[in-house]
Image (cartoon, rainbow, N blue to C red):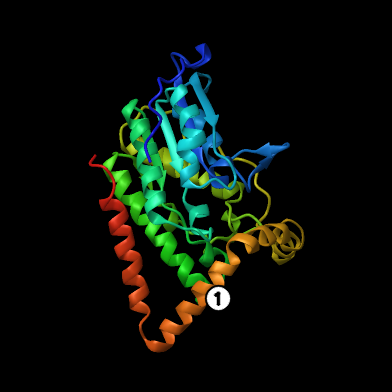
Amino acid sequence: MTAPTRPAPTAPTAWLDTVRFVALGDSLTEGVGSPVGDGWRGWSALLAPALAADPSQVRHRNLAVSGAQAADLTTSQLPAALSLRPHLAAVVIGGNDTLRAGFDIGRTAAALDATLGALTGQGAVLLTACLPDAGVLLGLPGPLARPLARRMAAVNAVVHELSQRHQAVHLHLATMPWLADRALLSADRLHPSPAGHLLIARRFHDLLAEAGHPLGPPPAAVAAPPPPGRGADLWWLATRGTAWLARRSVDLLPGLLGLAVTETVHRLRGSAAVLDARSLAATEAALAALPPP
């Protein structure tokens, strides 16, 4: 998969002579879990004003779309991002890839490499992140969680490699204390809460500061509700969660159940290492298939 070769449109006048920041990705970057009015105010919106001493000199565009996969970057989000000629570009995606029956680490790697390469080709500073495992966040049983963990590990390995290749400012989002601090997760247990989005924004700010980028003060604190209790978790499951599970059941669940059966058989035979080896080999092959940097 290659990035678009058409000349990018000229950036709007309001975007000239400013710090231009665009964010690409899925619901995590869209801001799901941190509501404001009728929309979301996620980590990229919290980070944007802190990217310059004068927040009015920062132009922020969030192109992320809930449900997006890596392949969606090159077909929809990337052309819009390139047209804005950003100074900084966040690309945080991959979780939805692992939650689809047709998961293909080769396709994910190719789309990410094309996107990151196109943005750095314009001189943008990249922000990337590895992601926590959805199965762990949701507390799924082992036979269901392990196949998802294997997929997430493959995506994160690709993100780590490509972050180094394209010299991105990389946040180890997967190692943040999501399970240790319930206040960081929203009621759906998959997306950050307002406190979680603020923590991501501040961590990115720290990394940019360490890399020597001129910045303003760290992202300001936001009003955050108390951590979701058991009642809020159950309410989400009974309302929005039911719809989410129904959509995923059509796509993911049949394939995931098949993976769970395979996982169980290999566990009983003592050959689970074979599955790990296959995943590792597929990841290495995906990276080897990419064009040279």
Most foreground residue, 37 or 22: 22
Q: Is the C terminus in the top left, top right, bottom left or bottom right quadrant?
A: top left
Q: Quadrant of residue 241?
A: bottom right
Q: Is the N terminus in the top left, top right, bottom left or bottom right quadrant?
A: top left
Give the residue displayed 53% in from the left and 41% down from the top. 43
As drawn, the residue found furthest toward the left would be: 292
In the image, taking residue 68 as reference, residue 82 lies left or right, namely left
Residue 169: % across, % down: 35, 40
Most foreground residue, 61 or 275: 275
Residue 278: % across, % down: 33, 69
Viewer can see residue 228: no
As drawn, the residue found furthest toward the bottom would be: 269
Give the residue displayed 37% in from the left and 73% down from the top. 275
Most foreground residue, 11 or 222: 11
Residue 140: % across, % down: 56, 71
At label 1, which amino acid type do we have?
Pro
Query: Is 191 situated above or below 78?
Result: below
In the image, taking residue 216 as reference, residue 243 lies left or right, namely right
Residue 84: % across, % down: 47, 22
Give the residue displayed 51% in from the left and 15% down from the top. 12
In the image, taking residue 292 as reference, residue 258 lies left or right, namely right
Most foreground residue, 151 or 55: 151
- The count of marks equals 1
Give the residue displayed 33% in from the left and 40% down from the top. 168
- The residue under label 1 is 141
Give the crowd class for mark 1: few <14, some 14-19, many >=20 residues within 10 Å.
few
| SS type, badge 1 | loop
Query: Is 149 situated above or below 197?
Result: below
